[in-house]
Image (cartoon, grey):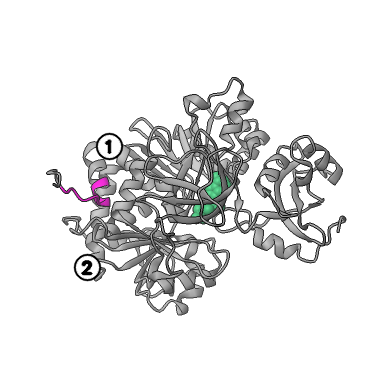
Amino acid sequence: MLGQMQDWPLLIHKIIDFAGAQHGRQEVVSRLIEGPIHRTTYGAVRGRALQVAQRLARDGIKLGDRVATLAWNTSRHLEAWYGITGIGAIYHTVNPRLFPEQIAWIVNHAEDRMIFTDLTFLPILEALQDKLPTIERYVVLTDGAHMPATKLRNAVAYEDWLSEADGDFRWAEFDERTAAGLCYTSGTTGNPKGVLYSHRSNVLHSLIASGLDALPLAPSTSCMPVVPMFHANSWGLAFSCPMKGAKMVMPGAKLDGASIYELLETEKVDFTAAVPTVWLMLLGYLQKEQKKLTTLKLVVIGGSACPPAMIRAFEQDYGVEVRHAWGMTEMSPIGSVAYIKPEARGETYEEVLKVKMKQGYAPFGVEMRIVDDDNKELPWDGKRFGRLKVAGPAVAQSYFKGEGGDILDENGFFDTGDVATIDEQGYMQITDRAKDVIKSGGEWISSIDIENFAVGHPDVAEAAVIGIAHPKWDERPLLIVVPKEGKTPTPEDLLDFLKPRIAKWWMPDDMQLVTEIPHTATGKINKLKLREAFKDYKLPTA
Ligand code: AMP
């Protein structure tokens, strides 16, 4: 017997309809690419999203068509998403930090018909446009006054294009499983793969991710999504903020410490989220300029491991709660958040910090397990580590166009490619990417653990650990360090510092100072590049 309740489809435009109706005067503040701070409301964003939808329909964009966005976080980008999805077309977020050839590859693979672009990226697109045959029109996210001369095909200033529609339009009707968004994984090996979100998965993800124990939002929240909309849906915030009526503060192109600080303070932001590298810049700025954070209460940090020194700095020096989170593009992206359950509240701060260092527990809507090489489930004892697998309504079932084949195991679980432990309380801790784990004498060494401790040294700005071939042990760890300005720590300094903190056989065999550690387009340490750079390096112990 089926239940007799309404089949109310989970469609993205219902989110902006709700925000317009219930929180129509709530603000969306953006640092425009042209420079000034721009203020609008959910009521206005909804109206303009309807104009976008109407105008796209007039350009012949229809259900299932892909429309790329190459844009920073601003209210224009937000309107574009709701407008695109409102006619059943698919927003395809393109990460501008990718190499131009990669951008061309994914735009062609996605067969995008239009690109919405910020002014910042005109030079990239002008250089690429001959390689982008599917693009019929470029909409430049600016007004007529700021529209530069450009050779881009059918280029038009967004505001001029938009003004040709009056917004008297009805959202299209379709199934909630209709595709809504496309985002390619950075793909350190092989070609990038497209993750194709649906209306249903995005709506459910927003409900899952905005819980009090995750990325909490309410009409009283002033939220700054620093994490870009092109990095896994800005961790859902572009949907969950309007869904919860929270104020949005969109930082545009300026993500340096001074610019972020200015917006945090002037817009009274109390909640923000981004990858550790962004917070490294902000903390550096705060320390240098002797500034205080007067309104910020919570920062969610994820995308790569958040070092304990960063958690400590935010919490103890600035009184801002840190929640470490883990996820991936394939998960929309939230997989876990380190909210402290009552049973995990320790006696001392050091005990709590041990839990906060972990990547957290899976909220309702994410199922998680760790397995051994035979896909046998491992116990949640906080010690045994294995491949981390996940399932849920906002987890990918396959990649766009079937690339990579069948990606679920016989139980319907997706292999994240991460190696992790899960403890008795459900807290998961990432040991490594499976391909970064260091195999020494048949045992595994976690590069993340060593990195976390190394950045606790007062002279260290950033640290990375990679495995180097060793004749006896197979691989041994090499510590690579970017020193803080004006400091030159020696290998002895670092190794003495690590000695009481990690197991003897985990101790790096050597340390190298570098001026910069390479990062991927989503802000992760690029271990592939580091391994390449150190491929001829010989360990002193070899
Ligand atoms: P992406 O799809 O670009 O967001 O990358 C997802 C991958 O980033 C995950 O599979 C992890 O390897 C890594 N990652 C994300 N968050 C964390 C975290 N908090 N700690 C360690 N690794 C993380």
Q: Amino acid at mark 2?
A: Arg
> Residue at the spot x=38%, y=54% of the render?
77
Q: Secondary structure at mark 1?
A: loop
Residue 247 at what x, y percent from top left? 36, 37
Query: In the image shown, does 41 or 87 lie closer to the viewer?
Result: 87
Magenta residue check for 465: no
Q: Which of pointers 1 and 2 lies earlier in the amino acid sequence?
A: 1
Q: Is residue 62 visible?
A: yes
CA–CA distance between discs 1 and 2? 29 Å
Please name the amino acid that badge 1 sits on. Answer: Arg
Picture quarter containing residue 221? top left
Q: Which mark is residue 25?
A: 1
Q: Is residue 164 above or below residue 22?
A: below
Residue shown at 63%/32% (left/top)? Answer: 313
Residue 325's disc number: none
- The x, y position of residue 466, in whole percent, is 71, 55
Decide if ligand 1 comes within 8 Å of the CB at mark 2: no
- The magenta span reads 7-15
